[in-house]
Image: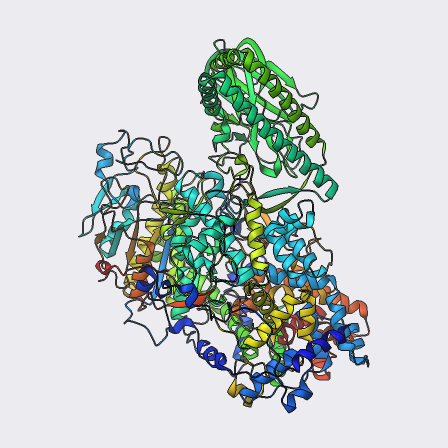
Amino acid sequence: MSNFSPFHRSRERLSPLSRRQFLWRSGGGLGGIALAWMLGKETAWAEAGRPGILTGALHYPAKAKRVVQLFMAGAASHIDLFDYKPALIKHQGEPADFGEHVEAFQDGLGPWMPPAWEFRPYGRCGKHLSEVVADLGSVVDDIAFVHNMVGKTGVHSTATYLQATGFAVPGFPGMGCWVSYGLGTLNENLPAFVVLPDQRGYASNGPKNWDSAFLPAEHQGTVIFPGMPNPIADLFPGKTDYLTPKSETAALDLLERLNQEHAKSREGDARLEARIRSYELAARMQLSAPEALDLSKEPRSILKMYGLDHGKTSFDKEINPVEETDYFGRKCLTARRLLERGVRFVQIWSGNDNSFPRRNWDSHEDVHRDHGPLAMGMARGASALIQDLKQRGMLEDTIILWTTEFGRMPSSQGSKGRDHNPYCFTNWLCGGGVRGGVSYGPSDEWGYKPADRDNPTEVYDIHATILHLLGINHEKLTFPHNGVNRRLTDVHGHVIRDLLA
Amino acid sequence: MLGSRIGNWFKGASLPGGLICVGLICNVAGATGALDKPLDAKDRDGGPSQAKKDPVAANQDWWSIRALAAPPAPKFSDWARHWARTPIDAFVAQRLDAVHLRPSPEADRATLIRRLYFDLLGLPPSPEEVRAFLQDKDPQSYEKLVDRLLASPRYGEHWARHWLDVVHYGDSHGYDKDQPRPNAWPYRDYVIRAFNQDKPYAQFVQEQLAGDVLHPDSADAIEATGFIAAGPWDLIGHAEVPETKIDGQIARHLDRDDMVTTAIGTFTSMTVQCAQCHYHKFDPISQEDYYSLQSVFAAVDRADRPYDDDPAIARQRRNLGDQRHRLEREIKRLDEQIHDQAGPELARLETQIEQLKSAQAGAQRPEFGYHSAIEPNDSVAKWVQADLGQPVSISQIVLIPSYDDFNQIGAGFGFPVRFKIEISDDPEFHAAVQSVADKTRADFPNPKAIPQIFSADGKQARYVRVTATKLAPRSNDYIFSLGELSVLDGRGTNAALHAKVTALDSIENPPRWARENLVDGYYYAANGSGTNAQELKLLEEKRQNLLDKPAVMALQNDLTNLQASLHGIEKEAAKLPKPKYVYAGAVHYGSGSFMGTGAKGGEPRVIRVLNRGDVRKPGQVMGPGALSWVTALPARFDLPKDAPEGERRLALAQWITDRRNPLAWRSIVNRVWQYHFGRGIVDTPNDFGKMGQTPTHPELLDWLAAHFRDGDQSLKSLHRLIVTSAVYRQVSTIRPEAAAIDGDNRYLWRMNRHRLEAEELRDSVLAVSGVLDLTMYGPGFQDFVIEKPENSPHYRYDLYDPEEAGSHRRSIYRFIIRSQPQPFLTALDCADPSMLVPKRDETLTPLQALALLNDNFMLAMPKHFATRLEQAGGGLESELGLGIELALGRPARAGERKDLTAYAQQFGLANACRVILNLNEFVFVD
């Protein structure tokens, strides 16, 4: 059986290189053409960036400029990773008594099940972490955990929409789109909002999670597959028998000349000039993107930090930590490079659609089997990203949000799995003005629901807090659509003051 | 004909009338956008707002709600008398006068013909058509051209695309595990036909909401109800979560919400969805209004609805259905009599029998059974086997077929056409194999739901293997599936229950499909066979004893006769040709989690007002109705309690199209205006409420709407009127002095230049390259490859070969996936089928430039374009001259032809063609 990893595919196809791969590998051969073309031009575009609707008009002084969102698709278990519940160990095997009627998504109301791994305290704050996320121990004092998250449904699709866009139905922009709309980009050569999906496939809802919906298309998340033969769709032409570097340079020249002529007799229409400029920006992206995605110049120490020094060229068929670390670490390192180059918002996905064999967090059958490798890979990459940003002085103005669509039940499903728990799950935040080393909003002794059921945290509160740190009043970043001034936070949301440094 | 129509309108235009442009000033102020007035969260959370004090009465003077009557067309000023061609121009001229603007001159004929082609057909004119039009000296040549274009089938294809944006049509469900919707397209074809036939608008509206009620035997009218189901559907929330669970209730509530939002937004331009959780914050729309609209759709789901092309067969099928329902009612009545006679013991026994049966019935369970991998042909042998743990003396082996609605297969899904059953103590089945049944030599009739029992005569073995030697057909592929495998020992105990199951291959897609589901004790059972058969038999005997009482027996005889008649009808129905299917809003006859209301004869679900939109906080029951704001009509539909569900939808359709309801007419003429000019008279085509924009030309809007309503409701007449106007024929050039007064061109002192929409651009590239395939109708072409179809299909657009046969059709025939929008068209702002798109964006981004330069489609087409030019011959310069004419609809200028020729000489014609397809002039229409 062949391995579906794109990295493997790229290795298999190394020889002969397709033209497109060659362009990517040579740091953008056509980019070089674009460069030659642009050098010959008199206009020089400053790497200024495109302003957002709030540029120069932020509501508060901003603590942060950038966001990384880590999204665990399939619903990662809070009680096996971050939310330590000794009661589950003490009462393991006893019939689960929730003290009320519980509606399970499937039939996961078996006996209490202890965490799949041991928990130990880390850092000055002494936070208990599961051994599969031990790599986060070294940065735990920078992290703020929120253990009383609640969702609206236990259905993956609607729950993923809710966490990604703030609405449980399709048709709303992702959080990154709102940030792009509000703040613009720091560098026009790259998109403001970049999405790094799981290389094996999209999570529930696919690209709808980062769609710009009613916001202008420029705010849509741009999908990049780091390590794939063609990381950005259409950045370079595929195979043809008529394109050459020279024909390309001359084509861009001719196109611009004819377009200028056309615009001359139609003065005053800014769109004609804008379209001419869009071809220049495209050429600049051809120049910038391959360099931004090229990890080969990273020193060994950095590759090691992200777990990319394993030296393997192929992986086992079964899910395993080395492979998961490679995938997630590569995306985290790519994220750092993109952030350094002015990207505003990077969304990293772990886990594909909820299919089989499981390469996602939807562990109905076996938490140990799926969560183990995924969590180890995630923890290594996330920890490296935090440390790396810190050593570059970027953690102070970069927010990292770890999230998932809902949690998992403290009771068992089958003998080794856990069912959906939309009533309680964990988020964590780090950097960018977030107070580290705190655990906010405890869950109850089982991790079944928030300890204080009347005051849970919802996605709106997380979104409001992140916007606040970016200098935005979440009630004032709006866009009119079909009769409503739409907001990321709908009509909800409170800034969680306890999380602010 | 044409002349007289315009003449009549002009008579109206000569009537006196004065106008004050108060609304205009307000509107300009409002145009800065609602960003200035963000919602206050407290205001929205804090319960009913200012609208509460008799809000309906207080808001009767709102422009969209006011009774609709045609205002007299204004008098012409001197300049306008010479300029105007239609009454439209009189209204526009008056506005221009008010702000001291003058219109722009008429565009040249080459510009006009290209504009008309794109506007009416979505395609460029051919060089021959351009030349003929430029040389046509007939003073009516423009009007004749308009008539020709409106008569073209390409017109319906183009305008259907606009309509499908508004109703968010798609060919897949969206949400999680986004599955294809193979029967959505008949609705798309209905819309194309409706535009081409110029269906009167009221009929068009009514058919989409209730065509099945109005014309139950018309294929056209049934296909129209695809409207109700056009939007996304949450498969998991319906198919895996029953209506009894909260998540299931939320999914169904949201599903109806989409139906209500779409119907009311599309036809009346009202934002009723804002009243789902609380009183509408800006418009006098109550929660009661909203839930009475949910009540209209309370019986229907999104489902494949059968129908017949032949009205005679449709009638036959319907008659048989009616007879069946009548007999069923009779049977029910008799049954009640029998129960009265037999006493309460009978009911008690029947409850027990029912419980026993449903305990066995897999119909209630999502665990379907075992499902092999999918094969392209039926000759692959596949096996599945159970390990009984130890050798067992086997009396019987029972194969119970699966049940899956996929492709309308239902019971007997995947049951092998040829197969054998063997037992052995060797798990590999190499040694000591004993045969229990061998059905490999002839095709085995599909048993549907009936368990197939094979005697094993007490043979002993540990492993039981079923091998399919000829697979069962699915859609265009083949599989092997079983619902349950039972292995009964001498005492009738099922030794296979929860046995370990292995198979050659298996699609593991729990909860529905998994190896272990083969022996989980759950299966679809149409009759009461299974593990509790003994007990069942006993109870049934007891019941029979009761029924054998003389007083009961007579009734029982009648009942048997009726049941025989029912059986006869069912047999007759089975003889009818197979129906077609359209994915429509219909009563769903399902089983398992997704039951629909079919089991209750389509009785509407009870709809209650939900406090804060929360399904856990139901309030008062709401019957069907609509918006109270329209006071000219009763807001609650006065239907008998037992009226069939379709009457509710019909009542809504009639409410919308009632001539006293002003909304539908204003809504549609505004939409049409918007597609012609790039901006509606009301710039928020889906919001005619207080948060929307107000009309720039309110009298013109009313004049158009009233004439449209009171005339023949012909969209083609409306187009004709608009495109023959002087305002439409202006140049699009920007005059600085006019732009200083009205930079946005709200008063229409020039025509708006328009960037080609995604589909227009793709279709034009195909047309210009000479490969456009004009095949109309039918299933859509797929410009992607599906991977992993069995679970969450991956739609791989990057694997599509742009040379693929059948994929060069117009974009309206594209198979539209919701979860993974087509990247090339998305870069060009095509409509997102997950949301209502009353107006598209028009962006110019670097990613769009990259798509136009480098997308595989855009790399393939220049070669066809070049081949076409080479075939025309005459040397490079002449060929490129033709290329310009084809793409830009005008003769080439010397300079550009020279430049392109020089480029082509160096790099080849295909390269030059690629440049042409990237020109600003190609993607903009003046």
> Residue A63 sits in which quadrant?
bottom left
> Residue B858 sits in which quadrant?
bottom right
In percent of width and height, residue B299 lies at 52, 43
The vertical placement of B36 against B105, above or below, is above
> Residue B699 sits in which quadrant?
bottom right
In percent of width and height, residue B883 lies at 73, 73
Q: Residue at x 72, y 65 (%)?
A: B767
Q: Nearer the viewer, residue A236 or B251?
A: B251
Q: Nearer the viewer, residue B86 or B500?
A: B86
The vertical placement of B421 against B910, above or below, is above
Q: Nearer the viewer, residue B260 or A18?
A: B260
Q: Nearer the viewer, residue B740 or A303?
A: B740
Q: Is residue B182 visible?
A: no
The vertical placement of A39 against B512, above or below, is below
Look at the image and tell me in which quarter the C terminus of chain B lies. bottom right
Look at the image and tell me in which quarter the N terminus of chain B lies. bottom right
B725 relative to B627 in the view: left or right: right
